[in-house]
Image (cartoon, grey):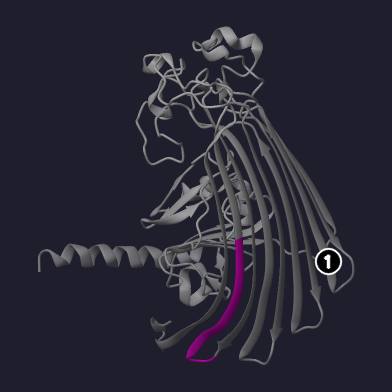
Amino acid sequence: MKIIRPVGTLLSIFIAFSAVAETTLEEIVVTAQRREQSLQEVPVSVTAFTGEAIERRNIKSATDYLALTPNVSFTEDGQAGSRGLGISVRGVNNLVSGENAVVNSIGVYLDGFSVASVPTQVANPFLPDMERLEVLRGPQGTYFGRNAVGGALNMATRNPTDEFGWKILAGGESYKGANEQHNVMTMVNLPVSDAFGLRGLAYYEESGGLVDNICRRGADAANCPTAGINGFTPNGAKDSGHEHLNLRLKALWEMSADTQIALTLIYADEDQGHDENVPSGIMDLDTVDSFGIQTAIDPGTGFWPNNRNELSHDLAESNSNETSVAILNVSHQWNEAWVLKSTTGLIKATQKRRFDNDGVGGLDGLGRINQYEGSSWSTELRAEGSFDAMELVLGAIYSRDRQEQQNNVFVSTGAELGHQSVGGVGILPPFPEGLGLLLNAKNHEITGLALFGDVTYHVTDSLDLIVG
């Protein structure tokens, strides 16, 4: 009994504090159970961010809000540009944007549409002018019906309003030892009529990059300790600077008091130089690099944490991502108890990546080119019922995913793979320039059908029974 009493005391204090907080904190509305509810009434482990909180905290990336979310971790893999991201919710993780997963355990939903099946950068979109963000922890299949065993990211864009408005925001960032970054965002809200409105947004960002390639230009050849090996000549490889363009248009048509139709169109074009990674000094045999040795070799820059912004690569590297999304949502109030909803969406994405696979400037041995194309289409029908003692959600979803990925690891300009850090001895025999050492293609198409449902029965005012 002495062990249990302190726990009971702690719980009673927590409940009393929550009761006071309810009267003082602004209500946060979420859709974690696929219907609008107060955050305090939702029996789901969820962290929510309102649009106002996103702007106030200057949240621009998934890393900004995931760092504020308990039981969630992430890695910035840097293998699909600066916004490449791997997410783990309660230890469950297979959403990695560099190496594309076939079936995900973390659902990513944008305006109700699942975009996780094309994981180029969709888990980490730019976040201006959002209505809310929700991070749901734990299985969500009975609410979302598709690939949400570990949890879900639920993102909602803002709807057009009935008042004309516009906004321009500009920003800049500067980091010690790195280049500057600038961005500008423009938003226009246009009420075309009493029943129809448009909301458009354009976001542009440019950066000189956080990590410099000391072998990037001929004038800097003296700064690269391996210059001259195998006739190496720096070839003008870009730094890690980037240019990002995001366009969004949302249309809302209120056909009647009972029926609404919303269309969301999104286009993103992201171009970047080399990855923003530096040598760690740790042998990593679990990377996508051919031999897993690059992080253990010092190319003359030193290791982390003494080196925070330099690497040495001899190939011109680039990361390019292009994504298009279309989402159609229809909602109809059938009667006082039932609401019928449908969500249909299409996403197409391409990713092109070229990088120095040996990771050592002057070795000039291995290069790699990845080309990825993917698309996902799905349509979902959902019925939501609300009664005095019960609420329920019934739904069905049909989906079709397609992915095509080509991978080419090749010998670059050096005929012998030797480097002073490994004694100047070639680690492979001489190969003809351009020879493909590893050529493969991954193509697949998946068609899926899911049925899902959730019933909440109010046993008492303070006790609910949930079955899903």
Vertical position of residue 418 compared to residue 59: above or below: above
Residue 114, can we see it? no
| Quadrant of residue 172 within the rendered picture | top right
Q: Badge 1: few (under 14), some or many (20 or more) residues near its Cα, within 10 Å?
A: many
Question: Closer to the camera, 185 or 312?
Answer: 312
- Identity of the residue furthest to the right in this view: 193
Vertical position of residue 466 compared to residue 409: above or below: below
Vertical position of residue 142 compared to residue 117: above or below: below
- Image coordinates of residue 44 in percent, x first then y, are 43, 69
Residue 239, can we see it? yes
Question: Closer to the camera, 364 or 184?
Answer: 364
Question: Closer to the camera, 279 or 153?
Answer: 279
The stretch of residues the image draws in magenta is: 387-402
Amino acid on which disc 1 is placed = Gly
| Quadrant of residue 428 within the rendered picture | top left
Quadrant location of the C terminus in the rendered image: bottom left
- Image coordinates of residue 304 in percent, x first then y, are 41, 25
Residue at coordinates 59% horizontally, 51% vertically from top-left? 405
| Magenta span includes 303 | no
Quadrant location of the N terminus in the rendered image: bottom left
Give SS at disc 1. Answer: strand
* Left-right relation of 146 to 341: left
Question: Closer to the camera, 294 or 163?
Answer: 294
- Identity of the residue furthest to the top in this view: 222
- Image coordinates of residue 298 in percent, x first then y, are 41, 19
* Left-right relation of 77 to 161: left
| Magenta span includes 395 | yes
Vertical position of residue 440 compared to residue 380: above or below: above
* Residue at mark 1: 197
- Image coordinates of residue 427 in percent, x first then y, are 40, 24
| Quadrant of residue 28 within the rendered picture | bottom right
Residue at coordinates 38% horizontally, 55% vertically from top-left? 71
